[in-house]
Amino acid sequence: MKKLSEVCSICGLPKELCICGTIAKEEAKIKVFVEKRRFGKKVTVVEGIEDKANPKQLTKKLKTKLACGGTFKNNKIELRGDHIRKMKQLLINAGFPEEKIEVE
Ligand SMILES: [Zn+2]
């Protein structure tokens, strides 16, 4: 017998039936911009991804795709380096609607 699947804490449905993440992605209002840090280092910031859309997992994915370091903190994804030109497509690939992604 299959093991009982994990249940979503938001809607109570098994994780494979849950669409909370999808809804959160569709409702997201994402802002992407590059910030200059100390010593002229650049950081690409992705703002506006809710917990339901699993920003931590997305951070991991983006780090792998861009082969850079990064963190998720204060509700922002921060990636080392300037990745602004690639970011929109990567977010679209991750399931976010193009029209909700604002790139500065
Ligand atoms: Zn759910």
Image (tube, helix red, strand yellow):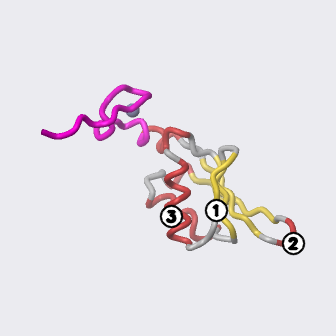
Q: Is residue 71 above or below residue 74?
A: below
Query: Is 91 inside the magenta-drawn segment?
Result: no
First of labels 2, 3 by sequence position: 2
Asked if labels 3 and 2 touch by Cβ distance under 8 angstroms, the answer is no
Assign a secondary structure to mark 2.
Answer: helix
Give me the C-alpha separation between circle 2 and circle 3.
28 Å
Q: Quadrant of the C terminus?
A: bottom right
Q: Which mark is residue 70?
A: 1
Q: Which residues are magenta?
A: 1-22
Q: Quadrant of the N terminus?
A: top left
The residue mark sitting in front, 3 or 1, is 1
Magenta span dominant secondary structure = loop
Instruction: Give the quarter of the image for residue 66.
Output: bottom right
Q: Amino acid at mark 3?
A: Leu
Instruction: Give the quarter of the image for residue 40.
Output: bottom right
Query: Is 15 inside the magenta-drawn segment?
Result: yes
Name which residue lies at 79% across and 71% down. 41
Q: Which mark is residue 90?
A: 3
x then y, percent, for residue 80: 68, 67
Asked if labels 1 and 3 touch by Cβ distance under 8 angstroms, the answer is no
The residue mark sitting in front, 2 or 3, is 2
Q: Is residue 46 above or below residue 89?
A: above
Q: Amino acid at mark 1?
A: Gly
Q: Is residue 4 above or below residue 79?
A: above
Residue receiving disc 2: 39
Near-viewer residue (62 or 29): 62
Give me the C-alpha separation between circle 3 and circle 1.
15 Å
Assign a secondary structure to mark 1.
Answer: strand
x then y, percent, for residue 15: 33, 38
